[in-house]
Every structure is written in structure tokens, then in C-alpha cells.
Image (cartoon, rainbow, N blue to C red):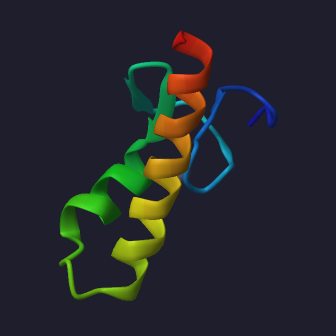
Amino acid sequence: MTGGNGKKCIFCKKMKNNGFYLLTAFICLDCEKEITALSPDDLKYNSYLSDIKMFWRQLEREVV
Ligand SMILES: [Zn+2]
């Protein structure tokens, strides 16, 4: 085990090796599973959504 490798997940903020990119944002497999399992009624769902919104705002700024 070598710690510190991988990419930083935008949701859990941990360094993970397994995941995918949503444009430039890395999302780890664990979070992806959690997100897809969430229902809109779930409190966590809203916090994920606000994370995504913040991420998009940052992107917009960079693109413009
Ligand atoms: Zn994650």
C-alpha cells in the first residue's frame, strides 16, 4: 500500500485511484455509487448537488 497516490475526488476530497472524470472534476467510484444510490429526498443528495453547483460555477468562471 502506497498512500498519497491518485486523484482528488471533488466530493469526499480524498485521494482515490478508481473513478472517472466529469469534465475536469474527478469523482471516485465510492462517491459515484453513493450518488447514484441517493434519492432526491436524501439530505446527502442536496449536499452533493450544492457541491456540483459550486463546481460548475468555478468552471464557468474559468471558461469565461
Ligand atoms: Zn469520493
User: Which image quarter holds the C terminus?
Assistant: top right
Q: Is residue 53 above or below residue 61?
A: below
The image position of residue 36, as x and y in percent, is 21, 60
Q: Is residue 54 left or right of residue 56?
A: right
Q: Viewed as shown, does residue 54 lie left or right of 46?
A: right
Of residue 46 and residue 8, the one placed in the foreground of this image is 46
Residue 32 in the image, given as x and y percentages of width and height: 33, 50
Please name whichever residue, 38 or 49, is drawn nearer the observer in this view of the structure.
49
**x and y, in percent, of residue 44 in the image:** 42, 79
Q: Please name the residue shown 53% across and 25% down the image.
A: 59
59 horizontally vs 62: left or right: left
- Report the residue at 42% width, 54% height from top: 30
Q: Residue furthest top?
A: 63
Q: Looking at the picture, how far across and down is residue 22, in whole percent?
A: 37, 28
Residue 7 falls in which quadrant of the image? top right
Residue 1 picture quarter: top right
Residue at screen point 55% across, 48% down = 54
Residue lying at the far front of the rendered structure:
64
Q: Nearer the viewer, residue 26 or 63?
A: 63
Callout count? 0
Q: Quadrant of residue 21?
A: top left
